[in-house]
Amino acid sequence: LTRGMDIFNVGSYFDLSCEEELPLLVCKSFNGTSGTIRVYDPTVVEEVSIINKNSSSNVSVGSGAGSNASSWDYYQSTTPTKKKKRRIKLLSTIDAHEHSVTRMVIGSSGSQSFLATTSSKGTTIRLFGLPRGDFLWEFHRGSRSCQFYSLAWSGSADRLVTYGSAD
């Protein structure tokens, strides 16, 4: 595997759960902190009004979720404009790591879903409860950095396995 060439690999930038009761989409935040992950419900679509940043109005998001608006929800123009877009519903934002998130994977056990993440530093694996993003556990693999190539849950999400190499 070549480092930095994993642009289309699932787990590098997003993961999608397969639970019928609560399907979840997790993805890296590209307009915020590199260690931040956003959790979405892909079955709920909200209408978003996007207003020019230079106007005196703020972004308004349907269903009262205005605090979840990101910088992507602004439209750049020289004249005040307003556009409507449809977005999937943001459930939570997780500040997972100080460094860039390199791998993430969702696992489900019964009614509970978990998110495991690794960072570019390569010394910790963190577990979060979904959909709220509650911090659950942290595993340390040592003080030397390593590159994680893969991260996977067992079928019942009671075991987590990773593959990587240290420089």
Image (cartoon, helix red, strand yellow):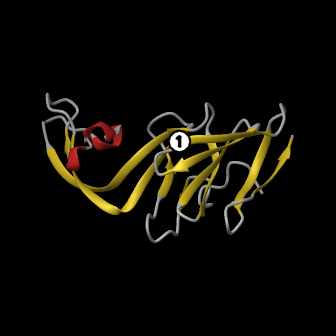
At a point 47% along the width and 60% down the height, the residue shown is 24
| Residue sitting nearer the eye, 147 or 124 | 124
Q: Residue at x 57, y 37 (%)?
A: 35
Left or right of 132? Residue 142 is right
How many numbered marks does the figure carry?
1
Q: Amino acid at mark 1?
A: Asp
Q: In this rendering, would 163 be left or right of 106?
A: right
Give the quarter of the image for residue 65. Answer: top left
Q: Considering the image in quadrants, where does the C terminus appear?
A: top right
Question: Element under label 1?
Answer: strand
Q: Within the image, what quadrant is residue 97 found in?
A: top right
- Residue 62: x, y in percent? 21, 49
Residue sitting nearer the eye, 91 or 52: 91
Residue at position x 86%, y 42% in the image: 166
- Residue 5: give x, y in percent of width and height: 67, 53
Where 149 sits versus 147, above or below?
below
The residue that disc 1 covers is: 134
Kindly identify the residue that appears in the image at 42 percent across and 44 percent down: 92
Task: State the quadrant of the N terminus.
Answer: bottom right
How packed mark 1 is, by other alpha carbons closer than 10 Å (few <14, some 14-19, many 20 or more), is some
Q: Report x, y in % for residue 109.
A: 61, 63
Where residue 63 appears, as percent x and y from the top left, is 21, 49
